[in-house]
Image: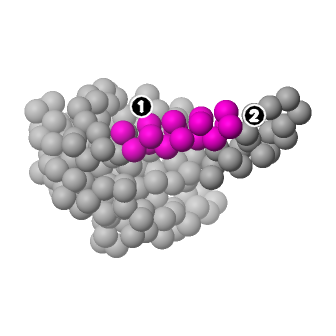
Amino acid sequence: MALHFTPEEFADRQSRAARAVADAGLEAILLFAPESHYWLTGYDTFGFAMFQCMVLTAGGDIALLTRPPDRLQALETSVLTEGQIHLWVDRAGVAPAEELKWLVSAMGVHGRIGIETRTAGLTHANGRAVEAAMGELVEASDLMPALRRVKSPAEIAHIRRAAELSDDALDAAIATARPGAFEGDILAAMQG
């Protein structure tokens, strides 16, 4: 598993997020932002351009609805287990929003549901389909960013290491740059 944080770090994040969902008076939240998926579980994919939704309940249950091509990515880059990953098959006439409605119901959610709408992970058409399938939803796009703003010691350590690597890359670029230098050589030095 290619995790950048420990399972305990992700468990703490999920616990804090579930409390925030409950504190907001919601029974669950529909997460479409890839940064929310990553922060909660480590799930990292370019598949967010397709219909993907992570559901987090106030009780702490979590599930991902995605396409079969993203299943292995979810298993390899996150703390999600096979049982938490639910698939919708991309074929003519498919309605992933209806699959989401089924998943939410199967998770025992029947009360107020929040939704992240301010994200590149949710197109207008998919958002309308979710609203049509799910009924009234509560705008909750600010919930996860507020949680992500407060950094854990592990996140601060990663940020510091990233800054060190950026400094090293800049030093390598400066050492390689000269009149007539090939940009590819500068980039190679930076990436090295």
Does 171 appear in magenta? yes
Residue positioned most to the right: 180
Residue 81 position within the rendered picture, expressed as x and y whole percent measured from the top left: 31, 70
Q: Is residue 44 left or right of residue 188?
A: left
Q: Residue at x 21, y 47 (%)?
A: 13
- Label 1 to label 2, Cα distance in Å? 44 Å
Q: Is residue 20 left or right of residue 143?
A: left
- Give the vertical position of 32 relative to 95 (above or below): above
Does 144 appear in magenta? no
Q: Is residue 96 visible?
A: no
What SS does tag 2 mark?
Answer: loop
State the residue position of label 2. Answer: 177
What SS does tag 1 mark?
Answer: loop
Q: Which residues are magenta?
A: 160-175
What type is the residue that disc 1 sits on? Thr
Q: Residue at x 37, y 65 (%)?
A: 85
Q: Is residue 105 left or right of residue 165?
A: left
Q: Nearer the viewer, residue 147 or 135?
A: 147
